[in-house]
Image (cartoon, coloured by chain):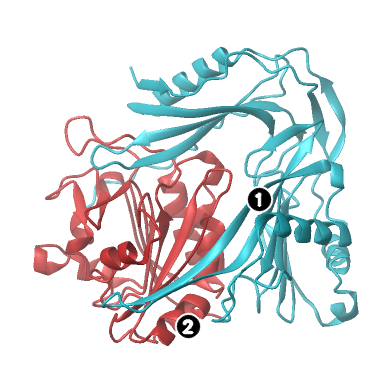
Chain colours: A red, B cyan
């Protein structure tokens, strides 16, 4: 048995030609909905799954910057985002097709975990650009305010029929109490598609961050991160 | 029209002795799972194992061992949860890739996981761990495992795709902590190949496919030829030659791009098609 967690998902496949223009994608719904449904089928609480123009930048942005994150991504424990992402100036950006205010949401306007969020999947490109400690720290110390683990890719990810089970596979493991970091790093890594996966844990101490990286499952829901003084990561390449 | 740039092209069809094979049904059952557990040396403790059947897999758990067999593909995921990808906070892998391949080959031979002439070494991946404090002064980084990947070969032709792979996980001491295998057994020659289509025709199909997907810009990084084997959750009845294209779909800002892949059958008398059209999801009503 695992502790029940609240789950949210957002994804974008289809962009517009006259605003928020990006290359269309095809399989982000398979990833996000696959994760969402797997979690739900194992008894976790499905709270929202917004796709295309229903995925909003304000859902990620903290109220300090005019957003509504505390009512959306930070009102669930586990959030799966699947779309375009880019990283420049040590800031993660994610793309949206609907322009509530902006077409991109930068990580400088995120306060992840301030209310409830524990686990955040960035199933998109460039969670980090490389694996140097300085870069990982520069991108992720700022936005992490209580979130336990960030999951993503080093460099670019893949939108393809051939890995469209990623969300579902990770969801199966997460829902059933597997170690989260290992599951993500294993499922998201692909030698064939040249995808390098990374999981980044937070903690008040080094021991705590490492412990989360090595052992955390959804059963750690209520074991809060009191401050993000340390990061501990693992990646395969 | 989408803007498609071919950065690398295959000029003509390769001259290789390819065939189209029928594949054995996966036929995953509890009996097969138990047989594989024995093959991996668990026979002495099987009476303590727990077996669980899910929609897409059968799971055997015994102590720290977790064995999952996927029903559609017959794929196997075998891990020692106490050691697989686990950091003991001191190990730092020291052996080189050549040694990693050698140790992994010995494991394949010992457990009869594949015949020596059915695969070639492909890549050694490494699992890295790191930690750092907020002031970015105390940084620790180590390598704690080697994931040794072998590529399946059929008639001397590589098997491409998410399948046709065998990955052995080694800890810093070279001990096996897990394995993953997607390797559908061949039943027989289903059909002789009556010639291969020219790559240009496959390129045209790629362009048409991207157009239907509304892709505006793509860079085609590579074109490869091989047999194509599907992943964990896919039923596959035939193994046939294919052209595989790797693509980049650029982001409008920054230097990022999403990668993608396109696969199309290569034989003039192919069985069905390898092109996968997107399953249609119901459109969400506008959010209020």
- Tell me the quarter of the picture where residue A58 sits: bottom left
Instruction: Label 1, secondary structure: give it.
Output: loop
Chain holding disc 1: B
Q: Is residue B6 above or below residue A78?
A: above
Q: Residue at x 38, y 38 (%)?
A: A25
- Tell me the quarter of the picture where residue B6 sits: top left
- For the N terminus of chain B, the image quarter is top left
| Residue A171 visible, this orientation | no
Q: Residues within 10 Å of mark 1 (few under 14, many from 20)?
A: many
Instruction: Label 2, secondary structure: give it.
Output: helix
- Tell me the quarter of the picture where residue A199 sits: bottom left
| Number of disc labels | 2
Chain holding disc 2: A
Closer-to-camera residue (A103/A47) = A103
Q: Residue A52: where, in percent of width, then height?
A: 30, 45
Q: Is residue B83 above or below residue B156?
A: below
Q: Is residue A111 above or below residue A185?
A: below
| Residue A112 visible, this orientation | yes
Per the rendering, the mark at residue A211 is 2
Q: Residue at x 70, y 18 (%)?
A: B267
Closer-to-camera residue (B282/A67) = A67
Q: Residues within 10 Å of mark 2 (few under 14, many from 20)?
A: some
Q: Residue B152: where, in percent of width, then height?
A: 75, 42
Q: CA distance from mark 1 to mark 2?
A: 30 Å
According to the picture, the residue beneath numbered tag 1 turns out to be B232
Left or right of B75 on screen, residue A91 = left
Per the rendering, the mark at residue B162 is none
Left or right of B167 on screen, residue B5 = left
Q: Residue at x 78, y 17 (%)?
A: B193
């Amino acid at each position: 048995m695992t502790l029940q967690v609240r789950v949210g998902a957002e994804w974008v496949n289809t962009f517009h030609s006259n605003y928020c223009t990006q290359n269309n994608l095809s399989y982000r719904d398979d990833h996000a909905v696959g994760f969402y449904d797997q979690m739900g089928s194992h008894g976790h609480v499905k709270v929202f799954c917004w796709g295309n123009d229903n995925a909003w930048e304000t859902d990620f942005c903290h109220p300090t910057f005019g957003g509504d994150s505390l009512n959306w991504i930070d009102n669930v424990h586990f959030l799966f985002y699947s779309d375009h992402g880019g990283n420049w100036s040590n800031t993660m950006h994610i793309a949206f097709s609907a322009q509530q205010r902006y077409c991109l949401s930068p990580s400088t306007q995120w306060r992840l975990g301030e209310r409830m969020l524990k686990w955040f999947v960035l199933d998109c490109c460039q969670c980090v650009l490389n694996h140097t400690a300085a870069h990982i720290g520069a991108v992720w110390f700022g936005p992490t305010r209580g979130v336990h683990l960030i999951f993503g890719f080093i460099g670019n990810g893949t939108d393809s029929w051939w890995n469209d089970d990623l969300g579902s596979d990770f969801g199966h493991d997460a829902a059933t109490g597997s170690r989260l970091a290992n599951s993500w790093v294993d499922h998201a890594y692909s030698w064939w598609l040249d995808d390098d996966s990374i999981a980044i844990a937070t903690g008040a101490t080094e021991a705590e961050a490492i412990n989360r990286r090595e052992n955390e499952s959804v059963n750690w829901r209520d074991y809060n991160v009191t401050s993000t003084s340390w990061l501990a990561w693992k990646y395969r390449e | 029209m989408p803007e498609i740039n071919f950065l690398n092209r295959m000029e003509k069809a390769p001259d290789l002795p390819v065939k189209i094979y029928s594949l054995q049904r996966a036929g995953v059952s509890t009996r097969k799972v138990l047989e594989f557990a024995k093959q991996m040396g668990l026979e002495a403790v099987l009476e303590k194992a727990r077996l669980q059947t899910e929609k897409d897999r059968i799971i055997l758990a015994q102590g720290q061992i977790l064995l999952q067999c996927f029903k559609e593909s017959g794929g196997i995921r075998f891990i020692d949860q106490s050691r697989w990808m686990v950091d003991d906070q001191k190990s730092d892998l020291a052996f080189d890739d050549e040694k990693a391949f050698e140790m992994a080959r010995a494991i394949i031979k010992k457990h009869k996981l594949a015949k020596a002439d059915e695969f070639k070494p492909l890549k050694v991946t490494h699992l890295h761990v790191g930690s750092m404090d907020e002031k970015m002064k105390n940084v620790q980084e180590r390598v704690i495992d080697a994931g040794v990947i072998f590529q399946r070969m059929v008639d001397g032709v590589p098997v491409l795709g998410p399948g046709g792979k065998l990955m052995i996980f080694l800890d810093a001491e070279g001990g096996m902590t897990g394995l993953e295998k997607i390797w559908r057994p061949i039943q027989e020659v289903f059909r002789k190949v009556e010639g291969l289509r020219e790559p240009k025709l496959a390129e045209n199909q790629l362009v048409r496919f991207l157009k239907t997907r509304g892709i505006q810009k793509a860079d085609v990084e590579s074109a490869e030829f091989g047999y194509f084997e599907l992943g964990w959750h896919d039923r596959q009845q035939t193994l046939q030659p294919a052209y595989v294209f790797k693509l980049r779909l650029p982001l409008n800002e920054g230097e990022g791009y999403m990668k993608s892949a396109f696969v199309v059958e290569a034989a003039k008398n192919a069985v069905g098609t390898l092109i996968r059209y997107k399953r249609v999801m119901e459109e969400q009503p506008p959010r209020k």
